[in-house]
Image (cartoon, rainbow, N blue to C red):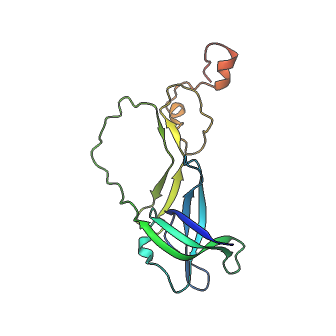
Amino acid sequence: MNRVCLIGLVGCWPRPVGPAGDLGFVLLTERDPLGQRVDRHRVILGGSHLPDISDFAPGATVYIEGHLARQGESRRVSVIAGCAWSILPAPPPVVAGEPTSSHASPREHQRSGHPRRVAIGTPRERLIWVRPTTVHPRSGLIPLNTGPGSAWTGAVADHQPVYSLSALFRSDKMTAV
């Protein structure tokens, strides 16, 4: 049986796809409960029973029922939606206001994975997934999940000494890298 039921976040505005005038968008679903990974599903809204797509803004939570198939000549598999409902509207954009704290001495804390809306109010508006990370670690060790867009670049950018994990095992004192 080829049946798909998904609940997720709309990743981009629905756009025309294919010659039949169907609409398509990306749906983000969490792959694991910790929010470390997300799955991106191509969803095609076709046929005469199109839902009100104004409710399908990036960041809105939707329910999709359909089946997996290839649309037209495409080699990519998509979810062909038979039914689609908006569950929750997209959250309003955050308005910059007065800061609530001084951040004078931030504490170490875990930042969970979360969706972020970018290019709000433009045709390129979409949802991206920010991976979970540790913010302001107490030790000066380089974490294993460094890379582009990581929150761990502060020590290098501030020219503070960065310590390698292998230095811990070579001697009882840390050696700056």
* Quarter of the image with the C terminus in it: top right
Q: Residue furthest left?
A: 98
Q: Quadrant of residue 19?
A: bottom right
Place of residue 136 in the rendered image (x, y in percent of width and height, measured from the top left): 47, 32
127 or 110, nearer to the observer: 110
Number of on-image labels = 0
Place of residue 116 in the rendered image (x, y in percent of width and height, measured from the top left): 47, 54
45 or 95, nearer to the observer: 45
User: At x 59% / y 45%, what residue is drawn?
Assistant: 148
* Quarter of the image with the N terminus in it: bottom right
Q: Could one spot residue 122 in this view of the protein?
A: no
Place of residue 35 in the rendered image (x, y in percent of width and height, measured from the top left): 54, 49
Place of residue 147 in the rendered image (x, y in percent of width and height, measured from the top left): 61, 42
92 or 2, nearer to the observer: 2
Q: Residue furthest top?
A: 172
Q: Could one spot residue 147 in this view of the protein?
A: yes
Q: Quadrant of residue 173?
A: top right
Depicted 109 relative to depicted 40: above or below: above
User: At x 35% / y 60%, what residue is drawn?
Assistant: 92
Depicted 87 relative to depicted 70: above or below: above
Q: Residue furthest front?
A: 1
